[in-house]
Image: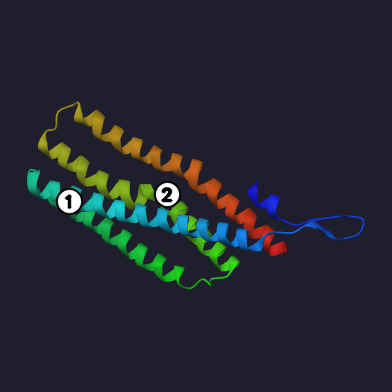
Amino acid sequence: MEFEEMKKIWDAQNNEPMYAINEEALFRRIRAKSSRASRISNINEIGLILIVIVTSGILLFVGNQSFYDYLSVFALLSIGLYIWIGRVRRKKQENQFGKSMLGELDQALANVNYETNRAKTFFWWFLLPVAIPAFLNMAQAGTPSWKWFVVPAAFVLSYFVVQWGLKRKQLPRKKELEALRNILAEE
């Protein structure tokens, strides 16, 4: 692990450090990790908000103008509002952390925890509210049978993509930041 290379190694015989941490380099690295975590959250939030707005617009102007289209638009815009409120809360929380090394690290951890929690609950706050009106609309409109395979497959695929990102990106990043936090707390 990178950070373990930077921590102090003590000589067991005379209790003197063989080499010391370059604190300035470590602080730059932590600041970069904190900025990256914040940037990832910003991109995810803005991307999801744009997706729900564009999809809502398509449903309003290209859809069948059925009750279920309007229900889907309502669900999508509610999700967009939910994401926006979460973004505002996250931004307020970011300002509460100090600009010290541990403060930056705690901020990065908070952002990674935020993304991790959002990925874990993706089914409940995104897929389910979108899927219910979509399937009701398909049932009401007499949708061709091939769409009954494609649309559920798209929902399942999106779920697995989010879970893959959680397991391959977010959880390892969280584990790395927590390990660094533990190392710095020991110092």
Residue with the most extreme right position: 13
Residue indicated by mark 1: 56
Decide if residue 146 is in sight here: yes
Q: Is residue 83 left or right of residue 52?
A: right
Residue 154 lies in quadrant: top left
Identify the disc placed on residue 104.
none
Residue 180 lies in quadrant: bottom right
State if disc 2 and disc 1 touch (CB < 8 Å): no
SS label for mark 1: helix
Amino acid at pointer 1: Ser
Identify the disc placed on residue 119.
2
Amino acid at pointer 2: Ala
The front one of 29 and 53 is 29
Q: How many marks?
A: 2
Q: Residue at x 48, y 73 (%)?
A: 96
Q: Which label's residue is closer to the chain start, 1 or 2? A: 1
The alpha-carbon separation of the residues under discs 1 and 2 comes to 22 Å
* Quadrant of the drawing holding the C terminus: bottom right
Residue 38 lies in quadrant: bottom left
Q: Is residue 109 left or right of residue 133?
A: right
Query: From the viewer's perspective, is residue 157 above or below residue 178?
Result: above
x and y, in percent, of residue 157 in the image: 35, 35
x and y, in percent, of residue 46 in the image: 30, 55
Q: Residue at x 41, y 53 (%)?
A: 40
